[in-house]
Image: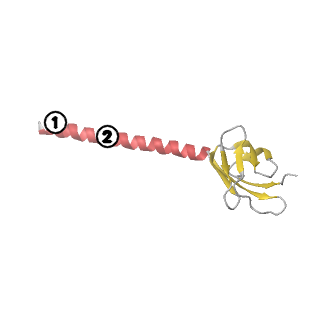
Amino acid sequence: MKKIFLAILATTMFLASYAEKNTESKSSEAEKETAVQTIDFTGSIIDQVSSEALVGVEVQIEGTDIKTYTDFDGNFKFENLKPGKYNVVASYISYEKSKLENIEVSQANSDLKIELETTK
């Protein structure tokens, strides 16, 4: 009786161990696919005349709810964007709204420089 119980216990432990390893490999493959399919898109915004960094500029991907604001150095960052072409809109009080169309977002091109002009 002990031999049967030990055999069943060993088989159960082996199957549980195999199932856990199989699940881990599938989840790591899915994580790799997700990591490859998205990138971070960064940029900076400055005043066109003085070249000073602009703080708190709203930067939005047109047609979506995705937006961010520039930091103290005028930098912004969009995380987990799929590569492709986007329209980027930058708006700030007392400055003309800047709309950049068909910006190619890819691994090779993921940094954008925008100069805003003051309202006349």
**Mark 1 secondary-structure assignment:** helix
Q: Amino acid at mark 1?
A: Ile
Report the side of 41 relative to 14 (left or right): right
Residue plotted at (73% across, 42% down)? 86
Mark on residue 4? 1
Q: Is residue 27 left or right of residue 110?
A: left
Foreground mark, 2 or 1, reads 2
Q: Residues within 10 Å of mark 2 (few under 14, many from 20)?
A: few
Neighbourhood count class around disc 1 (C-alpha, 10 Å): few under 14, some 14–19, many 20 upward: few
In this view, the residue in front, 113 or 70, is 70
Residue depicted at x 85% and y 61%:
49
| Residue at 80%, 63% in the rendered image | 51
Quadrant location, the N terminus? top left
Secondary structure at badge 2 equals helix
Q: Position of residue 114 (x, y in %)?
A: 78, 54
Foreground of the two, 112 or 74: 74
Amino acid at pointer 2: Ala
Which residue reaches farthest right?
A: 120
**Residue linked to disc 2:** 16
Residue 31, how many percent across, how many down? 52, 45
